Amino acid sequence: MDYREEETIVEFRNEVKGFISDNLPDDWGTLPQGEGYGETVFPITRSFQSAMAKRRWLTMAWPEEHGGLDAPHSQQMVMAEEMAYHRAPGGGGNMGVQWVGPSLMLYGTDAQKDEHLSRIADAESWWCTLYSEPGSGSDLASLQTRAVADGDDYVINGQKIWTSGAQVSDWGWLAARTDPDAPKHKGITMFMLRMDTPGITVRPLINMAEGHGFNEVFFEDVRVPKTNVVGETNRGWYHLAVALDFERSGIGAFAGGRRTVEEITEFAQDNKHLVDARPAVRYELAERAIEVEVGTYMAYRIAYMQEHGVVANHEASMSKLFGSELGQRIAKTGMDLLGMGGTVWSDGPYAALQGRLSRSYVSAVSSTIAAGTSEIQRNIIATRGLGLPRG
Ligand SMILES: Cc1cc2nc3c(=O)[nH]c(=O)nc-3n(C[C@H](O)[C@H](O)[C@H](O)COP(=O)(O)OP(=O)(O)OC[C@H]3O[C@@H](n4cnc5c(N)ncnc54)[C@H](O)[C@@H]3O)c2cc1C
């Protein structure tokens, strides 16, 4: 296949590149990122996304009536690809856009759509996702946070964990148990709740890359109006399963990986003594370059399927699995090249590539856990993709 982009896509790519350089500070790449929510970086993320929203780019694949552009998946993917390559905060971590909005379009009431969709599309509300609990991650349907009906409200009690961005979120997208006697998949309901509701406590969890990305969130007699239930009561698991599918098709890992492979290669060219000290790194870099190409076409295929109305399921798991494990291999290749220099953490005279590789080596560990672990992705590929029996 001779893959060539149409002229309109090439023009759009260039427009996105121009937008990124016009709307991000020159020193963006060197700012302390703090997992994206740091006090220097997060305001820039919000204003960048507001600028995107003015062009309807944040929600470009949404229907026009809900604040989108009805853009084809291929165009949305090109934007995500450029954003990831340039490490721009282009909506990848915006859960309101990624799955709250699309879920509301499918299951929300008219009042809920009126209240939330335009605010999400305009980058005015920021959302966090309250699914995982200390005892429920891969087996999410076993979640124990309780929601009990009381007059016009539900009263929520329990604990969530690993909640990314809870410390900066206006709204939470919560899965809670409404029927403890039903089989576990049949007693869950989805709620929207303001994160400043009395009874919610957010406690930071600092990860091993010294970033404050996720949190513990505690609920103590938190009252949520019944009008904030999304979809059918006790059918939340099925709504949530659809929302999880929105999460797993991204090109970001491959575009970001391509950029890092290019940087490591350039660094190796400029520091030949490091390659002489460990010649095998040339083969490793060659492997990584091939893998980035392979992954990119996996992601393109998913966009193509979606554009033709085919739901990407095990294909999306393949892309997620390959992309997250590739991120770890790329970081390791970089560290192998740098040797002792790779252990220098922060920017300084001895920190190669501003210490980025050592940081990404540590941060990449979580990518094979977040949004469904590699084992869970392999289970999906084996059963749904290859038709093998469950283990
Ligand atoms: C960076 C990051 C951000 C996150 N953000 C959020 C967020 O915003 N909101 C949220 O709700 N959650 C979030 N999470 C949590 C994430 O969804 C869970 O960590 C993930 O689903 C795994 O659950 P667990 O940590 O409980 O591990 P467990 O499910 O306890 O898994 C432990 C180990 O057992 C393996 N395992 C479990 N079940 C099976 C099986 N059936 N077959 C084979 N192996 C299995 C797993 O692969 C893993 O190796 C985030 C996690 C990370 C790392």
Image (cartoon, rainbow, N blue to C red):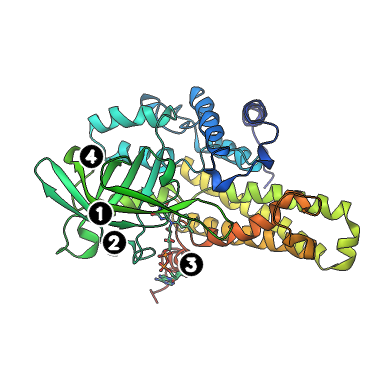
Q: Secondary structure at mark 4?
A: helix
Say which mark, if any, is on residue 228.
4
- Distance of label 3 from label 1 (alpha carbons): 27 Å
Instruction: For the residues labelled 1 and 2, say whether their Cβ atoms are less than 8 Å apart.
Output: yes
* Amino acid of disc 3: Arg
- For the C terminus, give its image quadrant: bottom left
Task: For marks 3 and 1, give the one nearer the viewer.
Answer: 1
Upstream in the sequence, badge 4 or badge 2?
2
- Distance of label 4 from label 3 (alpha carbons): 35 Å
Instruction: For the residues labelled 4 and 1, say whether their Cβ atoms are less than 8 Å apart.
Output: no
* Amino acid of disc 4: Asn
Q: Return the residue at label 3.
A: 378
Q: Secondary structure at mark 3?
A: helix
Upstream in the sequence, badge 1 or badge 2?
2
Q: Return the residue at label 2.
A: 143
Q: Nearer the viewer, residue 314 or 66?
A: 66
Say which mark, if any, is on residue 176.
1
**Drawn side of residue 278 relative to residue 4, left or right:** right
Label 3 CB sits under 8 Å from any ligand 1 atom: yes
Judge the density around disc 2: few (<14), some (14-19), many (≥20) Cα neighbours within 10 Å. many
Q: Secondary structure at mark 2?
A: loop
